[in-house]
């Protein structure tokens, strides 16, 4: 097995494990929990669940693009993403749970349909980056892993795979540094500051 296939297989394992953590956490939520505030500013727990559902549908569009060659953007624009989340958060919890489970399963099925040669096909993310479709595995892994923690329902970063944590930490450090937060990060990581040094959650 070549390194690309091995890496893809590993990230797929992280994605599947993190998806199970997220789905399990949502299953443990009480109906009243959905309207509670989440750690993300301005978002309820229902907003997070709706976001993760619609994220699966958006990534499915990229997978379809890579498989068929017919361009299919994640979103028509930022307004679509915002409107989908806002609508999804108003749905009854039982309906939102079902949508979440169905879209997660459908995404897994769609990914399984990609032939080896298709994984290098280029797609464009919502941020305008041109990437091979294999990158969608990591995109989804981040979403379900971090947001499983955000649900506050028994999942912690210690539950995520070690390899995933290493890649996630390196990516966050790079993006935070690029955003001008390098000094606060260095102080905290070297044990020379107290408490969380950053003003808002990432992702």
Image (cartoon, rainbow, N blue to C red):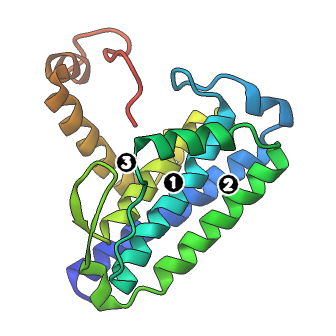
Give the mark nearer the N terminus: 2 vs 3: 2
The residue positioned farthest toward the top in the image shown: 194
Q: CA distance from mark 2 to mark 3?
A: 19 Å
**From this viewpoint, is residue 156 visible?**
no
Residue at image position (30%, 41%) is 169
**Is residue 115 found left or right of 50 in the rendered image?**
left
Q: CA distance from mark 1 to mark 2?
A: 14 Å
Identify the image quadrant of the C terminus: top left
Q: Secondary structure at mark 1?
A: helix
- The answer to whether marks 1 and 3 mark residues whose Cβ atoms lie closer than 8 Å is no
Q: Position of residue 140 (x, y in %)?
A: 45, 57
Residue at image position (33%, 83%) is 69
Q: Residues within 10 Å of mark 1 (few under 14, many from 20)?
A: many
Of residues 193 and 76, the one drawn nearer to the viewer in this rendering: 76
**Is residue 62 found left or right of 33 in the rendered image?**
left
| Residue at image mark 2 | 23
Q: CA distance from mark 1 to mark 3?
A: 21 Å
Give the mark nearer the N terminus: 1 vs 3: 1
| Residue at image mark 3 | 165
Of residues 78 and 5, the one drawn nearer to the viewer in this rendering: 78
Q: Secondary structure at mark 3?
A: helix
| Residue at image mark 1 | 55
Q: Residues within 10 Å of mark 3 (few under 14, many from 20)?
A: some
Task: Report the number of discs.
Answer: 3
> Against 167, is 152 above or below?
above
Q: Nearer the viewer, mark 1 or mark 2?
A: 1
- The answer to whether marks 2 and 3 mark residues whose Cβ atoms lie closer than 8 Å is no
Q: Nearer the viewer, mark 2 or mark 3?
A: 2
């Amino acid at each position: 097995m070549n390194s690309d296939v091995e890496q893809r297989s590993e990230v797929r394992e992280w994605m599947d494990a993190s998806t199970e953590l997220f789905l399990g956490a949502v299953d443990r939520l009480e109906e009243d929990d959905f309207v509670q505030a989440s750690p993300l500013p301005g978002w309820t727990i229902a907003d997070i669940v709706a976001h993760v559902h619609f994220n699966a549908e958006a990534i499915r569009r990229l997978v379809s693009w890579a498989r068929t060659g017919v361009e299919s953007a994640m979103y028509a624009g930022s307004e679509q993403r915002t409107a989908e989340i806002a609508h999804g958060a108003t749905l009854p919890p039982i309906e939102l749970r079902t949508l979440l489970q169905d879209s997660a399963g459908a995404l897994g099925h769609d990914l399984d349909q990609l032939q080896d040669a298709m994984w290098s096909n280029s797609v464009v993310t919502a941020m305008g980056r041109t990437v091979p479709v294999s990158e969608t595995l990591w995109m989804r892994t981040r979403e379900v892993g971090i947001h499983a923690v955000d649900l506050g329902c028994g999942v912690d970063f210690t539950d995520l795979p070690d390899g995933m944590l290493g890649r996630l930490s390196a990516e966050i450090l790079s993006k935070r540094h690029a955003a001008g937060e390098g000094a606060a990060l260095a102080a905290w990581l070297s044990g020379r500051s107290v408490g969380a040094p950053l003003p808002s959650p990432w992702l």
